[in-house]
Amino acid sequence: MAKTTHIVVTSIPVFSHQSSIIEFCKRLIHLHHHIHVTCIFPTIDAPIPATLKLLESLPSSINCTFLPPINKQDLPHDVVLEIELAVVQSMPSLRSSLRLLCSTSTCTPVSALVVDPFASHALEIAKDLNLLSFVYFPLSAMGTSLFLHLPTLHEQVSGEYKDHTDPIQIPGCIPIHGQDLPPEFFHDRSSPAYGFFLLHSKNFSLAHGFLVNSFSKMEASTARALQKMHNNSTQLVYLVGPIIQNGSKSIDESNGSDCLKWLENQTPNTVLYVSFGSACTLSQQQINELALGLEVSGQKFLWVLREPSNSINVGNHSATNDHDDPLKFLPQGFLERTKEQGLVVPFWAPQTQILSHISTGGFLTHCGWNSTLESLVFGVPMITWPLFSEQRMNAMLLEGLGVGLKVRFNEIGIAERDEIAKVIRDLMIGEERSEIRQRIEDLKDVAAGALAEDGSSTMALSLFGTQMKNLSLCNEI
């Protein structure tokens, strides 16, 4: 009987990060039956309900535990700092849990720790406990390259990034402008958020390697640059994607049923799916413009709507009242006027089932990486509407690959109804549609190839698991 290798993974209290690393674990143990995984997640107030739902179907070789919750009232109102400090305050509990798992006689001692990039403080714990350590990036290779290159970039660029006139070169990536870097972190170098981002980047030197949720043929030059950056070190880089959520579960199954029944009655490739993820909201003004743009476009749509943000700025992670009915924020008469054209559902819909449905022909997306990969895997052309974090970089990647059209914003950052209607028509019935569809179908095939038995990502993940088995005894790469 093969010796069991015990790996611990930890993430941050954000569903998109937790779901991605859980799916990574499921794929890892599918390839390596000798690996047992323990997930240890920090929490703010309580575990995320969507994560709890996802955990219901875990295989027996993966178990999950939650660290003692951090009181949300004791944290800053700024979302980035809230998450950061919640993770920092959870580190003593994580250390205690890891120490117990390393010493217990009731299970196989831990060999390695896999951490989210925003939980890099745990790498120091791994070092103290003599564990192998790896960083799992639920990001593109481009986003990963930025993270790893930041200590150098910090020295090269003087002043604010957003004011930097020359394009910024990230290894293996197309040059980008400073204002396209993640705004929460990069628009003020004196901010605590940037300081934390830089600290995480420096902490990565403690890791034995990096796992990236992308695939080499989609980001070939960036993949080569990542490998080259670490050719002269003992750190290994594994591109193991696309890792996406298999099936969608929610505490509200009725929404999912309604969506799928509605899609069944639509013509193939005619429905535009509109969703900004589980954490993003728009301003009231922007909701109005989007609604009217959808209506004027004349195209079928399925829109997952959340209540508006507190401010005029889009991209806030939370809204005024989680219990508000989002439908009441739509323009007067909109639902009645569009009842034959579209369906609006509150809060949540089964995204992977919608994207894989034959009726779905386009996706208006915030360009979160999980959503981006899901759209690529199912071959759905995109309209890019980035809101925060690295989403602008993801949008640039999609536009460069020729599988997405961009929404343009006015001088105060609002996408107007006529612009929205135009880009929707261009994607769904315009002259470019056939070429965009062909390119994303080609990319869909490439993604499937990466996950095939002899595909690049399967081979990379297989290599990672084999090295865990071989290296867990000597604890060195």
Image (cartoon, helix red, strand yellow):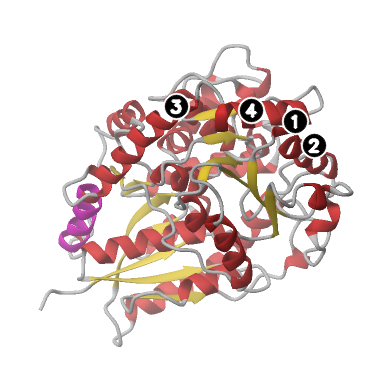
Instruction: Give the magenta range.
Output: 459-470
Q: Amino acid at mark 1?
A: Ala
The local secondary structure at tag 2 comes to: helix
What label sits on residue 434 in the rendered view? 3
What label sits on residue 423 in the rendered view? 4
User: How far, Cα to Cα, is label 1 from label 3?
Assistant: 25 Å
Residue that carries the numbered disc 1 in the rendered image: 415
Mark 4 vs mark 1: in front: 4
Q: Amino acid at mark 3?
A: Ser
**What crowding class fits label 2: few (fewer than 14 Cα within 10 Å), some (14-19), or many (20 or more)?**
many
What label sits on residue 289 in the rendered view? 2
Q: Residue furthest top?
A: 166
User: How far, Cα to Cα, is label 4 from label 1?
Assistant: 11 Å
The local secondary structure at tag 3 comes to: helix
User: How far, Cα to Cα, is label 2 from label 1?
Assistant: 7 Å
Q: Amino acid at mark 2?
A: Glu
**What crowding class fits label 1: few (fewer than 14 Cα within 10 Å), some (14-19), or many (20 or more)?**
many
Which quarter of the rendered picture does the N terminus lie within?
A: bottom left
Residue 68, picture quadrant: bottom right
The reply to whether callout 2 and callout 1 are in contact (CB within 8 Å) is yes
What label sits on residue 257 in the rendered view? none
